[in-house]
Image: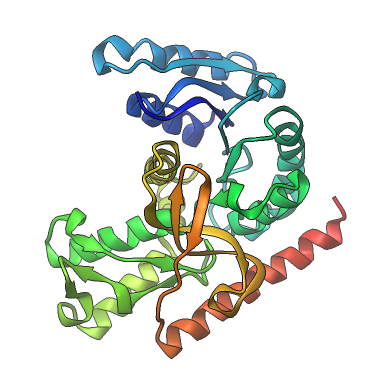
Amino acid sequence: MTGWSKIAIIGAGNIGGTLAQRLAEADVSEELVLVDIVEGLPQGKALDIQESAPIVGFSTRIWGSTKLSDIAQSDLVVLTAGLARKPGMSRSDLLGKNAQILKAHAEAIRDHAPRALVLVVTNPVDVMAYYVRKVTGFPRERVVAESGTLDSTRFRWFVAEALGVAPRDVVGFVMGTHGDTMVPILSHCSVNGVPVTRLLPPEKLRAIVERTRKGGGEIVDLLKMGSAYYAPAAAQAEMAIAMARGQNRLLSASVLLNGEFGLRDVYLGVPVVLGRTGLVRVQEIDLTPEERTALETSAKAVRTDLSVLESLAL
């Protein structure tokens, strides 16, 4: 086994439970604790996953708890707890309530796992990541958020579906906020090196971009109750495994920008290298004028939500 000693996942709902299963099966930590406020929920899910170990073959010891103090000495803490979207509800609608939930979690990380990396999942994720970093006081390298990783896999699948090709052959990034102003980067999307702009007509590409932006909402509308969790958990696992194994993967993730892409003091999805220490570096890439303008618009949307969060004085 290569990886960490301990991973903690706060929130044992659909995302937290599915992510726990993926990480246990990947065998990237000796121990994994699943934490939730509902007595029996984290313990039950942890035991259920643990009992699959003889079949699947993993060695990770997984257990559940209702105590935030049980995240102590974790190498990675994943924050999945929070309210899920309902039909017609935007990620920003969740802002105030989820910030209140994450405040206690961020304080627990600061007090009990002061050396941990933090992966923020709770929506609106770009704003929540900014808030968690502020509460913990951690450097930006140690607080990253899922956004572009999930949006990029949706984008890549829609391209693969349109072309009838293997999904793994599609390479592409989505930048910006994890919301309606996200920016699928067509100029850097390719299928085994062939630019997608040579393979699909403009009207089809526009439809894929729009579907990517509405990808989470499409699933919310279909489910009627709850939101996506299989693809999100896969995206989170990809990020966590990259960090646990020091793979230095080039992925799209939300990080605090310090002048990259001409933006500062805002969390936004951009191409980054993730490794053992968390954020290794932001990888700047050339963007078309239209993509750069869209990225700036996306940053403004996050700043609007940040202003709302500051007004709440949590």
What residue lies at 64% left-to-right and 68% top-to-bottom? 302
What is the number of callouts on the image? 0
Q: Position of residue 41 (x, y in %)?
A: 56, 19
Measuring from the top left, give residue 67's x and y in whole percent: 70, 19
The reply to whether residue 86 is visible in this rendering is: no
Residue visible at 59% across and 13% down in the picture: 40
Say which quarter of the image contains residue 92: bottom right
Residue 211, compared with residue 73, is above or below; it is below
Give the image quarter of residue 241.
top left
Q: Is residue 239 above or below residue 45?
A: below
Residue 47 in sight in this render: yes
Q: Viewed as shown, does residue 160 lie left or right of 114? A: left
- Give the residue at the far right of this rendering: 313
Q: Between 51 and 115, which is closer to the camera in this rendering?
A: 115
In the image shown, does 280 or 200 lie closer to the viewer? 280
The N terminus sits in image quarter: top left
Q: Does residue 298 lie above or below 219 as drawn?
A: below
Task: Give x and y (percent) for residue 91.
Answer: 60, 57
- Left or right of residue 104: residue 215: left
State left or right for residue 166 relative to residue 218.
left
Q: How is the image coloured?
A: rainbow
Which of the two residues, 248 or 40, is positioned nearer the viewer here? 248
**33 shown above or below 211:** above
Image point (57%, 39%), residue name: 80
Farthest residue, direction bottom: 289
Horizontal side, residue 33 vs residue 108: left or right: left
| Image spot of residue 39 (x, y percent) | 64, 15
